[in-house]
Image (cartoon, rainbow, N blue to C red):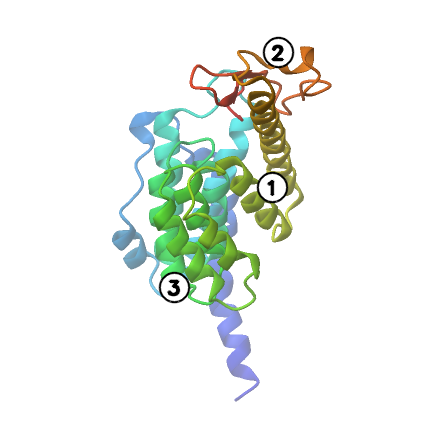
Amino acid sequence: MQRVLPIVLILLLLPIHASILSKVAEGNKLLPKGEGTSYVLPSPILKIMSLEFDGIASDYTFLKALVFFGSTFERKERPRVKEWEWRWFYNILNASTHLDPYFLDPYYVAQAHLTWEGNMVRETNALLEKGSRYRDWDWVLPFYLGFNSFYFLLEDAKASEYLMEASKRPDASPILASLATRLAYKGKKTENAVIFLQEILSGTDDENTKKMYETRLNALKAILFLERAATAYQERFKRPPEKLEDMTAKNVIREIPKDPYGGKFYIDKDGSIKTTSELR
């Protein structure tokens, strides 16, 4: 009887598995074709419909999000992803994490794309808050919350709270606690962002995501280099540089670094270093 029971369970699950594979194969047909088709069923309804198969339903929902996002890279028009599509992308990731709040990948994808490209930082933080509550052993999610609060939302005090929480969790980097205290000081935004991204890279295994973060890190390092050069120029000549070329002309720097995103660095009216690519 003990040998028969696993076989019976496998036979019962085979039709469900086949059905899921069939739906995955038709994934492209299920993607939103227009704003009117971008509706995502409310999470409570999806949870009821999934019966006891929350994990499988969460995987399938997340797979739809990946298939959609991957398809956008074939587009020629700009912006590559429309505003309503970002909303759909967020809703589908939210649904996936509602079905299985312990599932890490949707939080990871939201952090990588909804923040930098989709301009949905607060929505992403809402997702990360959920994940951080359930995955209470995981230091990465409160770390992401800290980065978003610091870099995008300019909420240093909140960022410090998140980083302190991250520092208390198992396997957290020792640097997190000291980084949290640094946020009590004004300025050093770019320098702290570089430290943040270096920590993110150290915990990133996916090669495509790693390449994306490396590009951002190199861009921020170039900005930090130019910021420090502008400070040195100010100290030497008792006035700020009006343009970056002033610093090469006065031999403060040898050359202006290149923006890895293909843009051009410049000094904005407020004296800050900007780039025409906007780091995208």
User: Which labelled disc corresponds to residue 246?
Assistant: 2
Residue at image location 45% in from the left, 43% down from the top: 110
Looking at the rendering, which quadrant does residue 39 occupy?
A: top left
Q: Which residue is mark 3?
A: 134
Q: Secondary structure at mark 2?
A: helix
Q: Whole-Å distance between the Cαs marked 2 and 3?
A: 53 Å
Q: Whole-Å distance between the Cαs marked 1 and 2?
A: 36 Å
Label 1 packing within 10 angstroms: few (<14), some (14-19), many (20+)? some
Label 3 packing within 10 angstroms: few (<14), some (14-19), many (20+)? some
Residue at image location 51% in from the left, 63% down from the top: 14
The residue type indicated by label 1 comes to: Thr
Question: Can you name the residue that lies furthest to the bottom here?
Answer: 1
Q: Whole-Å distance between the Cαs marked 1 and 3?
A: 24 Å
Say if 222 sits above or below 67 in the image.
above
Q: Is residue 138 visible?
A: no
Residue 277 x/y as whole percent: 54, 20
User: Which labelled disc corresponds to residue 176?
Assistant: none
Q: Give the side of residue 98 with respect to residue 229, left or right.
A: left
The residue type indicated by label 3 comes to: Tyr
First reached walking from the N terminus: tag 1 or tag 2: 1
Q: Secondary structure at mark 1?
A: helix
Task: Give the number of the mark in front: 2 or 3.
Answer: 2
User: Which labelled disc corresponds to residue 209?
Assistant: 1
Say if 243 sits above or below 148 in the image.
above
The one nearer the camera, 162 or 103, is 162
Say if 134 sits above or below 37 in the image.
below
Q: Is the C-beta separation of discs 1 and 3 under 8 Å?
A: no
Label 2 packing within 10 angstroms: few (<14), some (14-19), many (20+)? some
Q: Secondary structure at mark 3?
A: helix
